[in-house]
Image: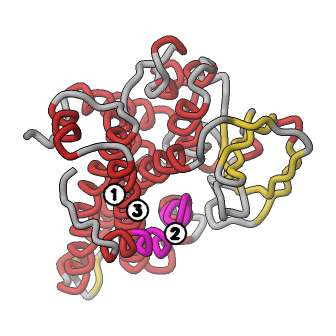
Amino acid sequence: MNFGFTDEQLALAATVRDVLRTHCPPAALRSERRPAWEQLAALGFFGLLLPPESDGLGLGLADILPALEETGRACLPGPVVETAVVAPYLLPDNPKPASGALCVTVLPPGQAYAPDADLADLLLVARDGGWRLVARESAHLVPRTGVDPCRPVFEVAFDESEELGGPAAPALRRAAVATAAQLIGVARELLAVTVAYARVRTQFGAAIGSFQAVKHQLADAAVAVEFAAPLVHRAALSVDRAAGSVDGAAESVDRAAGTGDRAVGTADRDVSAAKAAAGEAAVLAARVALQAHGAIGYTEELDLRFWLARAWSLSAAYGTTAAHRERVRTAVLGGDLRRWP
């Protein structure tokens, strides 16, 4: 079986990368709240998961993982995951996200604040195992201090809301996997910037990248990222499978092994493994980057601080690393040791 991404999936990622390099350079992070959003909307990025009848492409989550990684690599501001991944699942009949005319944010269960709520036209609030849809005009937002300057958080209260059908868990799985993909992109960019810096920064007459201690730290971070990325890819396949949105060989495996509750349990385990590994890899890459750059790394002078903050903020989004590790531990100790599916 070929576990690589298809040419079409990689081409989509390359196109998104080109758009972000042009319209979301590091300088834009200092002055704009949603750089490159119009260009991504024109590309069809926000409608990738929407069904064709809602002006989307009807792709699966696994199809867009490389593109989501690019949004992390560029540190793209705004509620990207919420608008491009959660909204198509919870609001599949609404074509507005495809055109970029609708911006959505999410307040997950157990989380006190909603990110980028001031930009959102709609807020999706997880309550009592389900979802409440809140219009922007009904929401009362109070800004709170957050670690990420490009991902401000808000306390949310509301007067009126509409109940959405269905449980909260499937959408939260998708959000966690998409966030994990962004974390992989953040970690890759942190590593690339730090390796480039280590090659030119000299100390004691030699580039610091030639020092054994620096090499080991960079290697540890690179290994963590390379081990985490396949877990994210696997989690996306598990989520798609649990929703019945994959076909071909994967479906035949499912029919042989059974679906339903088993597929959902497998998806929960794989999602938590992916989010925990991606969060740890990004935080490790951030720590290594900061140690290599020194104190200048988190100053206003250097753009690196945006990626450091993004690694820290996304690692806590949609479940902390500790919470997801606990879910994996429960699944393993409960006897679910199957490797596939």
Residue 306 seen by the camera? yes
Q: Is residue 33 left or right of residue 156?
A: left
Most foreground residue, 121 or 132: 132
Q: Residue at x 47, y 76 (%)?
A: 322
Q: Quadrant of residue 58?
A: top left
For label 1, count other residues whose C-alpha is less than 10 Å away and answer few (under 14), some (14-19) or many (20+): many
Residue 306 spot, x, y in % from top left: 54, 59
- The image quadrant where one finds the N terminus is top left
Residue that sits furthest to the left in the current view: 1
Label 1 close to label 3 by CB (< 8 Å): yes
Residue 164 spot, x, y in % from top left: 69, 36
Q: Is residue 163 left or right of residue 64?
A: right
Identify the mark at residue 272; answer none if there is no mark: 3
Identify the residue position indicated by label 2 in the image: 320
**Which amino acid, mark 2?**
Thr
**Which amino acid, mark 1?**
Asp
For label 2, count other residues whose C-alpha is less than 10 Å away and answer few (under 14), some (14-19) or many (20+): some
